[in-house]
Image: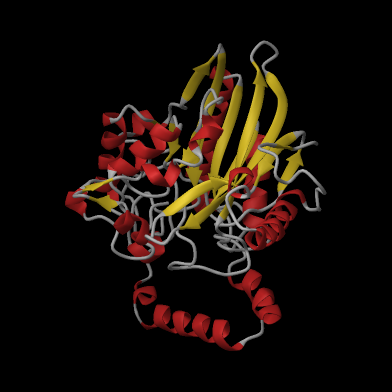
Amino acid sequence: MCKLPQLKASWIDGKYNFNPVFDKISGVFHNSNYVVGNMETPLAGPALGFTKTASNFNAPIEFAMAAQQAGFDCFAIANNHSLDRGVEGLFNTIENLKSINAEFTGGYKTSEESVIPFVKQINGLRIAILSYTYGTNSEWLGNELDDSHKDCIDLFRKQDSFNSAKQGSSSSLITHLKNFAKKYLPQSIREKIKPIVIEDCVKNPDLLPCDKYFDNKLKEKIRLAKGTADVVIMYMHSGGQFNSKVGDYTKNLAHRLIDYGCDYVIGSHPHCVLNYEIYKDKFIAYSLGNFCYTPHYGYHYDGVFSDYSMIVNLYLDTNEKKLTRKTIVVTKTVLESNGNSVVYPVSLLVKQISEKEKQQLEKDVRSVLRRFFGDDIGCGIWQEEIDIVS
């Protein structure tokens, strides 16, 4: 993500320079054959207006260029912010990514393009990379796609209908209630309230009749991917924001994706690290947290370590065409005095801070790892890579 403070801090000498954001993390990717990440902002160009608020985005193409220079090869662009600048913004994003020779998945200009799975051949191994989202904030922004554009974003379900009431007094009331809770309620009560309020991005966990078109299209695309590729990876944008557990809708969805034929499901949207699961011998990471994020700005909850993230490394045997090893790299976004947010692997960060800061970092990292693994992993938290043994 590229939030407003990051945008302002990266305007240097009359141009945007986001390279410092990724300088500390780039070494992690040097030995990778291919790096994929969720690009949770349009890259729609200055004519449509860059980010001006806390939750409606548009970043300069220089943001993607800096990520690309750091090691990213491909961007998943289906998420709830894909249409923050409308269909025009999506089409601009596609063209801008093409202009820097960045590969992407999840967004299209035509229905014909949308049915073709993105497949990358790496050392003889064919890997399909899909990117889908539960929605596009249409209930707030009114960006529902018409029939001529309904295939331009890979959607798990029908977009929510625009509710104009959410633009008025109700949203103000919600804000006041949240501020009241934060100010006056004890932490223990706030933690109990949070899962009820933001348990998942979709209330009904069942597949509804209105979603059948999108589900059938999803099923067919996974089927085509299975017929074309050796491995199918799904970037799943779904979940309750800043929640501490996986909601029913997202869990059912992840299981359905495996049932349809995906080999790995990598989740985003909750803005905090959540647990992984092995389902039918397949790997699901429900949420990797925030890789690039302005801590404590805008829509934010304390206590869920939203400035931390995981990088998942999948080691695949190109001859056997199977997984041989899974690891994670723990990262933290550090807000610097100039307003810049810098992504660090914690294995590097721990070497550059005071003893007192190290104690707090260790406490936080252990908590983040506990969220992912479900238990304390003991020693070895400062390793560059931590193995997922399952």
> 148 above or below 358?
above
From the top left corner, tell me how far across and down residue 266 is, in percent: 60, 41
From the top left corner, tell me how far across and down residue 139 is, in percent: 40, 64
Q: Nearer the viewer, residue 163 or 18?
A: 18
> 321 above or below 47?
above
How many numbered badges does the structure rendering display? 0
> 104 above or below 337?
above
Q: Nearer the viewer, residue 232 or 303?
A: 303
Quarter of the C terminus within the rendering: top right
User: Could one spot residue 39 in this view of the protein?
Assistant: no
Q: Residue at x 49, y 36 (%)?
A: 26
From the top left corner, tell me how far across and down residue 93 is, in percent: 30, 41
The residue lying furthest to the front in this view is 354
Q: Residue at x 79, y 36 (%)?
A: 389
Q: Would residue 161 be found to the left or right of residue 358 on screen?
A: left
The residue lying furthest to the bottom in this view is 184
Colouring scheme applied when the structure was drawn: secondary structure
From the top left corner, tell me how far across and down residue 345 is, in percent: 58, 44
